[in-house]
Image (cartoon, rainbow, N blue to C red):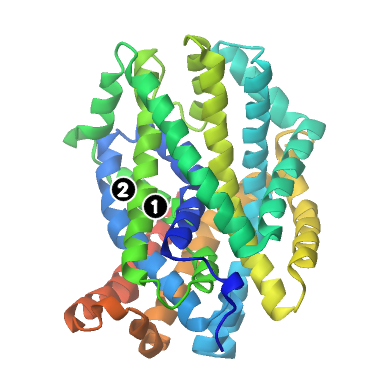
Amino acid sequence: MARPKEKTFTGKAGFILASVGAAIGLGAIWKFPYMAGAEGGAAFLIPYIFFSFTLAFGLLLAEITLGKAGKGGIVTAYRNLGGPFWSVLGYLGILIGFVVLSFYSVVGGWCLMYLFESIVGFSASTPQALGSLFGELSSSPSIAVCAQVGFLALVGFVVAFGIRGGIELCSKILMPLLFIFMCILIVTGLCQPGAWKGVEYLFMPDFSKFSWKALLDAMGLVFFSYSVGAGCMVTYGAYIDKKTDLISSTFWIVTLSLLISLMAGLMILPANFAFGMDPAAGPGLTFITMPAIFSMLPAGQFFAIVFFCCLVVAALTSAVSMLEIDITWMVQELKLSRPVAVAVCLIFMLILSVPCALSFGVLADVKFFGKTVFDSADFLVSNLGLPIGGIIACMLCAWTAWDRIHTEWTTIAAYPTRVKIIRLIIGVFCPALVLAVLISGLIN
């Protein structure tokens, strides 16, 4: 049965922009720069690019095709393509969506907090004072929870308007704005004396810095930053019209997402070198080092506002895709209306996510196997849930439902060799790499 037009993306461009929005999240703008800084710049970038066009491409194509061929979200599509057993496995994606947002919304709340701080003006300017400020904001129960609630409310507002009026419209407005904001910050950073050292660090390979750890970390970040394994792209794939070409769409998603990651590196690392900051500062690079840099720039407050707008946009578009996994399941499987599904989902999300927000304050001493609630949620998703979900998608796509999958790739149907190569990438190469991510994550 054909899907109503209002329940599909308006076309290829709308689908690609929404998917890029899902993929570029905080993994691209927050995590990529500090990991590239810590792992030797180009020594990390080269394997990241390689895995983007192999691992990420294969996993994205698999999930998108499963959604389109299965005509539904992760549970519905898995049942339609593989039967009842696979639908049970699909519920892993529903669980991952909840858990990811439980801690992702905390970081999204931080982004909102810092956007507000940048508007009113930071009360601190040195890295030490900014570190204390971050500790105060993240440990305050009222501030942390209110910021998290505000972020989740934004996410729910977008999703409540549906695919075209909410997710696609939001992506069409915010993605170009994100690109413009990032260009402003890149040009500003590159104009500072000494900034070119950051460009060389990011793009000029120093082969002495290549390591097995950098390789595994690049593979893991590709897996995390492209939003694969949870079922986001299965869900978005369910809303594609018949005319959308999956191969070229997936290629554009990977290319544009990679471009945004590179722009994030150019936005942050050259400025760090220009002002003598440590590029290997870790997660604090975003919330501590960058505000310190803005305090030394002419019109620094304006650039701080632009920077944290970028973070909010990235966090919002990615979180929207995560929430849509569960909303689609509630609409298709539980037969709830979209507004009711959004309300129910957000209520449960708040119950689940508040302990994560309090992990840096009143619940800081509550630990499971040495990890706070926030760290435990992050570990379960990043090290277990997403890799297992990725392997499940690959197996269903390349082996169980292959006869119904490859027929969706109409542009390469006349090239059987290419089809076989893609099958090997999805069915053998990707699961092997994902297994390496899973094992390395558990060992580390």
- Compared with 18, 291 (above or below) is above
Contact between marks 1 and 2 (CB within 8 A): the answer is: yes
Q: Write the residue at 39% across / 52% down.
A: 222
Q: Position of residue 88 (x, y in %)?
A: 61, 81
Q: Residue, x 70% and y 35% (percent of image)?
A: 360
Where disc 2 sits, the SS reads helix
Mark 2 highlights which residue?
48
Q: Residues within 10 Å of mark 1 (few under 14, many from 20)?
A: many
Is residue 268 something one can see in this rendering?
Answer: no
Foreground: 214 or 399? Answer: 399
How far apart are the alpha carbons under marks 1 and 2? 7 Å
Circle 1: residue type: Val
Task: From this view, report whether residue 225 is shown above or below residue 110.
Answer: below
Residue 80 visible in rendering: yes
Name the secondary structure under disc 1. helix
- Please state the horizontal and vertical placement of residue 45, each as a whole percent of the image: 29, 41
Relative to residue 217, is residue 235 depicted above or below? Answer: below
Q: From the top left corner, tell me how far across and down residue 94 is, in percent.
A: 63, 68
Quadrant of residue 106 within the rendered picture? top right
Q: Which residue is mark 1?
A: 222
Q: Which mark is residue 106?
A: none
